[in-house]
Amino acid sequence: MDSHSADMVEFGPRTHVLVTGGAGFLGSALVDLLLARHCSVTVIDDLSNGLLSNLPVGDPRLTVRAFRVGDPAFNAAVRDEVGQADAVFHLASPIGVQRAHKERFAVTSGILESGCSIVEACRLHRRPLLYTSSSEVYGSGRDRPITESDPVMTDIRPRWGYAAAKAAVEHLVAGLLFDFGIPAWIVRPFNMAGPRQRSATGLVLPVFVNAALRGEALV
């Protein structure tokens, strides 16, 4: 086994972690946690949703690289960064159902391109991967309550392009584990809230909070 063995990752001073989308609401919270555990961290983020101000950019253990994962011009850079990491967290993604309705092609292709780039690099270097998918893969949620074993149900409406792309990358991530024996995990967050979350991304909870603070209806 080399020093980057996928069989065991202990998050501590000797661990180097790659976080894509690490300047975002959720990604920056993860970076804070990893730094608190004395890991070194590289963040890749194109800053389309995230903000540099979310990150402790002066920390010598943190490296930030500003480009879009999935851009063919940076595929070699992604492979290099994955090769240097002990573990990879893939959070980079277009955000929000609102954007999926307005930019169907860009949203769907962005999810697929970034997912393929990261998964292929993890396959090449045999690095463990945690992929942040979405609760959108469950479709409209007609059966209540939703469980993790529910089937994924989508159609051709714009909203489901986002969900279908997330689900497709889930299959690639599952292939890392079942076809190649590389540790991999999939998480499907539902609505989250916390510091650094912005209503500009169209997420329902910060939109509601901002409306309530202004005394407006929660639409």
Image (cartoon, rainbow, N blue to C red):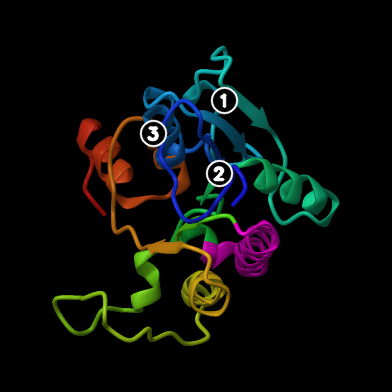
Find numbered disc 2 in the image and state the secondary structure of the residue it sits on.
Answer: loop
Residue 118's quadrant in the figure? Answer: bottom right
- Residue type at mark 1? Leu
Position above or below: 152 against 90: below
Residue highlighted by disc 2: 86
- Please say if 29 is above or below 72: above
Q: In this orientation, which residue lies closer to the viewer: 39 or 2? A: 2
Residue type at numbered disc 2: Asp
Q: Residues within 10 Å of mark 1 (few under 14, many from 20)?
A: some
Tell me if label 2 and label 1 are in contact, CB under 8 Å: no
Q: Residue 29, which numbered label?
A: 3
Image position, residue 198 (x, y; %): 41, 37
Please report the residue visible at 31 percent of the width from the left and 79 percent of the height from the top: 140
Image quadrant occupied by the C terminus = bottom left
- Give the residue drawn at x 52%, y 56%: 128
Which picture quadrant has residue 210?
Answer: top left
| Picture mark count | 3
Instruction: State the extent of the magenta-drawn residues as a range.
Output: 100-126
The residue lying at 61 percent from left, 42 percent from top is 85
Q: Which residue occupies the foreground of this view, 183 or 138? A: 183
Magenta stretch: helix, strand or loop mostly: helix
Disc number placed over residue 52 in the picture, else none: 1
The x and y percentages for residue 28 are 45, 33
For marks 1 and 3, the one nearer the N-term is: 3
| Numbered disc in front, either 2 or 1 | 2
- Marks 2/1: CA–CA distance: 24 Å
Name the spot of residue 14 as percent of width and height, x first: 51, 29
**In the image, residue 202 above or below residue 169:** above
Query: Mark on residue 84?
Result: none
